[in-house]
């Protein structure tokens, strides 16, 4: 029996070869009808035998293109029209009203690494795109960073200034071609082109790739324009050049990311398992943290000073493959000065990067938005995102259905924001630390872009309780137009993991980070919470200690050592440890006694800093978390023993005491050394987590444990605590698609807001 159906498909279905797939599928089943893009996704009408129409519907999802992600299909029965043939119609846009029709359901594909077909063409001397640096098709290439508006058509991207030549246009309109309606489609005749210039902007004559390679061989630092911004690049085996890059970039200790041409080359320097190899080779192409192997000596020691791990990624653009042809490893770090956002505009590149880079390998395709590389690791049996950006953003995460459209603005450090509509949370790419005007401006601009792209008009803004966070101040500036909801920092951490894993009921939350504004006005961070997305209670926390000089203590961990020693040993013993503090500590401690800029902190991150400073040979750190990272690196599992915490009832909650731990660590500093302190301290944290979770289970009956907060980026701690708790019968959850650090805060804020709205 002949029948006709209308299908509406939503998800990532534009710019990923979905319409040609639909066309080919309909043709193969001898169905008539049409397909086109619109603001809500893809609309299809099919007509034919009912069995064939049903088979079409099943195969539509099962055989969708590799980059497609179908989130919903609605199907309605129509009267057969008798039309003959199947066609792809022109896209529709601008036909929707907020008041009449639902919000758009089209999703935007993240930028994806080059596919195997395009890579073969790049390397084939007989192909017309041989060695063309901008090869792409519907299965790969730029998307998110070039899209200006929806629907996803060439005129709405930064490719609009490159009219297609006859050959490219022929591919573009051929439904059986994998470049059918590939919006960035181009070749060397009609598409973007490369150039190489010095740091004054003088373009050099000759092959741009070869000029860039020569500069790298000559020991120069070059800036390379990528998908979401510029990278600073140098030969990773040239120690003098790597040191030069550190000096120019003002990045003294933090590890550099590397790019290596293939897994075989990675194996020369790193050890990796099957999951890490799969992650490295995936089209998302994140930076993956790997352990160095014995053959890593060919790399400059300055890549990751004193660190057994390095961040490695494989090439993900044709340009990268061409540049890497003559190198085993290149430093590939964000094009910026330390603590500033990545440079992505050509107009700013020379001015900002000209004092760091000796030359520029660039091109004339505009980047519409900046987007850093994503960072991931494999820990405790799961892939963990440490920075969710290129390759993932703006792909939404599922979230409980929201009664209202909302904006959650995140925190201050490692900021991301998210817009929520229905059951979708659209997380931004990594924005960075909102402590300079450039990053703040980027944060504000991206919120505007996301609202426009997904046509979301927030009816509520959710923010952190900290009154001085610039994200909170941004929310307060919108208060005249929109209602606000403040969410406690560590509740947001708890809710992020609960929502990501769709945990039912309450959970025990081990929420460990450096600083978060508490409801009592103190700085929390060593928190044991019991709760869900709606509510939480503070079951236990680390005992408070003054933070001498406020935020200055974060960059000068000796201040935390001073505070812990004074509390654990008495102020009269401070002089004994004066070598740890440097000059002026007496005046600083006097200020603490006067209550001047010395907020109370229960931060686990601050305890890590204090213990690290007890056995460190330097007074300051150069990047966030450096003291804790170096403490983790000093662990020696051959050393026995563990320090202890005390757990005592204090009112309605438990207080976790660290005083004896500090005294024992000071003895080990003199008698056993740094490795003993690091090892016994980490074991103490593992034991504490087991004991406090047992106590919480005894009183609440709960056996679900959530781990969140920046401290859980410590791979040793994450793996040891997870295995210890699981052996004790707990179910343990931590972020996978979301970072453990404050990059997850906006999603947690949104989850809390939705739960509270539903309660009301």
Image (spheres, rainbow, N blue to C red):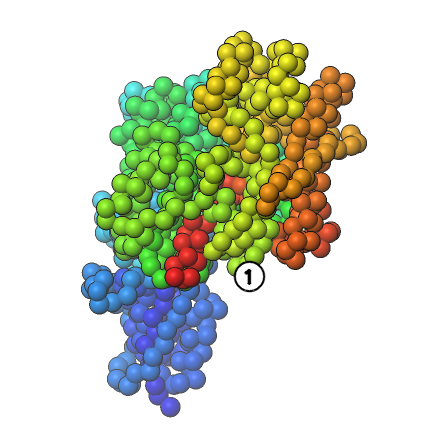
Question: Dividing the picture into quarters, in which one does residue 288 lie?
Answer: top right
- Residue 687 appears left or right of 255: right
Label 1: few (<14), some (14–19) or many (≥20) C-alpha neighbours in 10 Å = few
User: Outermost residue toward the top?
Assistant: 583
The residue beneath circle 1 is 504
Quadrant in the picture for the N terminus: bottom left
- Relative image position of residue 142 (x, y in whole percent): 37, 47
- Residue 411 appears left or right of 290: left
User: Outermost residue toward the front?
Assistant: 651
Name the element at disc 1.
loop
- Relative image position of residue 382 (x, y in whole percent): 60, 49
Q: Which residue is at 41% across, 57% downward?
A: 756
Against 501, is 131 above or below? above
Quadrant in the picture for the C terminus: bottom left
| Of the pair 564 and 277, the residue shown nearer to us | 564
Against 299, is 17 above or below? below
Q: Which residue is at 67% across, 28% downward?
A: 659
Question: Dividing the picture into quarters, in which one does residue 181 lie?
Answer: bottom left
Against 620, is 182 above or below? below
């Amino acid at each position: 029996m002949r029948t006709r159906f209308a299908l509406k498909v939503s998800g990532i279905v534009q710019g990923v070869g979905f319409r040609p797939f639909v066309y080919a599928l309909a043709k193969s089943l001898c169905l008539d009808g049409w397909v086109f893009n619109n603001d809500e996704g893809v609309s299809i009408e099919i007509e034919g035998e009912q069995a064939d129409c049903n088979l079409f519907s099943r195969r539509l999802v099962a055989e969708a293109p590799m980059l497609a992600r179908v989130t919903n299909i609605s199907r309605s029965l129509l009267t057969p029209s008798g039309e003959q043939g199947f066609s792809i119609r022109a896209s529709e846009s601008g036909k929707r009203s907020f008041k009449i029709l639902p919000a758009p359901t089209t999703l935007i594909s993240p930028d994806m690494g080059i596919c195997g077909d395009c890579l073969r063409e790049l390397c084939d001397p007989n192909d017309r795109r041989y060695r063309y640096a901008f090869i792409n098709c519907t299965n790969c290439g730029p998307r998110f960073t070039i899209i200006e508006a929806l629907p996803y058509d060439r005129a709405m991207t930064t490719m609009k200034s490159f009219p297609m030549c006859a050959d490219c246009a022929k591919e573009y309109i051929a439904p059986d071609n994998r470049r059918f309606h590939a919006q960035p489609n181009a070749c060397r005749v009609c598409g973007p082109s490369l150039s190489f210039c010095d740091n004054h902007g003088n373009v050099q004559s000759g092959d741009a790739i070869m000029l860039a390679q020569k500069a790298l061989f000559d020991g120069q630092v070059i800036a390379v324009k990528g998908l979401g911004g510029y990278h600073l690049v140098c030969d990773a085996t040239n120690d003098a050049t790597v040191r030069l890059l550190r000096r120019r970039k003002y990045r003294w200790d933090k590890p550099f990311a590397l790019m290596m041409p293939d897994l075989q080359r990675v194996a020369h320097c790193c050890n990796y398992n099957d999951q890490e190899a799969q992650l490295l080779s995936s089209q998302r192409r994140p930076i993956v943290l790997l352990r160095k192997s014995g053959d890593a000596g060919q790399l400059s020691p300055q890549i990751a000073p004193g660190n057994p791990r390095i961040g490695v990624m494989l090439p993900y653009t044709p340009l990268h493959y061409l540049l890497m042809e003559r190198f085993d490893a290149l430093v590939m770090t964000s094009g910026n000065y330390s603590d500033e956002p990545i440079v992505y505009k050509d107009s700013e590149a020379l001015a900002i990067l000209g004092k760091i880079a000796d030359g520029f390998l660039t091109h004339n395709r505009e980047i519409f938005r900046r987007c850093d590389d994503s960072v991931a690791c494999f820990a405790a049996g799961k892939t963990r995102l440490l920075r969710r950006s290129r390759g993932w953003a703006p792909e939404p995460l599922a979230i409980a259905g929201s009664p209202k459209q909302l904006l959650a603005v995140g925190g201050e450090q490692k900021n991301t924001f998210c817009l929520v509509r229905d059951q979708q949370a659209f997380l931004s790419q990594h924005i960075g630390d909102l402590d300079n005007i450039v990053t703040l401006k980027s944060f504000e601009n991206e919120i505007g872009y996301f609202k426009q792209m997904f046509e979301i008009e927030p009816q509520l803004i959710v923010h952190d309780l900290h009154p001085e966070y610039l994200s909170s101040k941004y929310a307060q500036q919108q208060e005249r137009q929109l209602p606000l909801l403040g969410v406690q920092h560590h509740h947001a951490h708890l809710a992020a993991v609960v929502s990501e894993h769709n945990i039912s009921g309450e959970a025990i939350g081990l929420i460990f980070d450096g600083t978060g504004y508490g409801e009592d006005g103190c700085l929390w961070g060593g928190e044991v919470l019991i709760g869900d997305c709606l509510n939480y209670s503070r079951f236990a926390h680390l005992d408070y200690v003054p933070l001498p000089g406020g935020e200055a203590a974060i960059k000068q961990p000796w201040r935390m050592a001073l505070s812990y020693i004074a509390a654990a040993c008495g102020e009269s013993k401070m002089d004994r440890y004066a070598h740890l503090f440097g000059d002026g500590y007496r005046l600083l401690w006097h200020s603490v006694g006067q209550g001047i800029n010395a907020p109370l902190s229960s931060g686990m991150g601050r305890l890590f800093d204090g213990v690290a400073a007890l056995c460190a040979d330097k007074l300051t750190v150069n990047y966030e978390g450096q003291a804790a990272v170096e403490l983790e690196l000093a662990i020696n599992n051959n050393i026995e023993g563990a320090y202890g915490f005390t757990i005592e009832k204090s009112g309605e909650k438990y207080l976790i005491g660290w005083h004896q731990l500090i005294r024992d660590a000071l003895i080990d500093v003199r008698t056993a050394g740094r490795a003993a302190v690091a090892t016994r301290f980490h074991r103490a944290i593992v034991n504490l987590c087991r004991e406090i979770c047992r106590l919480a289970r005894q009183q609440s009956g709960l056996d679900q444990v959530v781990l969140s907060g920046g401290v859980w980026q410590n791979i040793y701690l994450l793996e040891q605590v997870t295995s210890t708790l699981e052996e004790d019968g707990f179910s343990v959850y931590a972020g996978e698609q979301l970072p453990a650090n404050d990059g997850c805060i906006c999603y947690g804020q949104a989850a809390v807001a939705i739960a509270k709205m539903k309660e009301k």
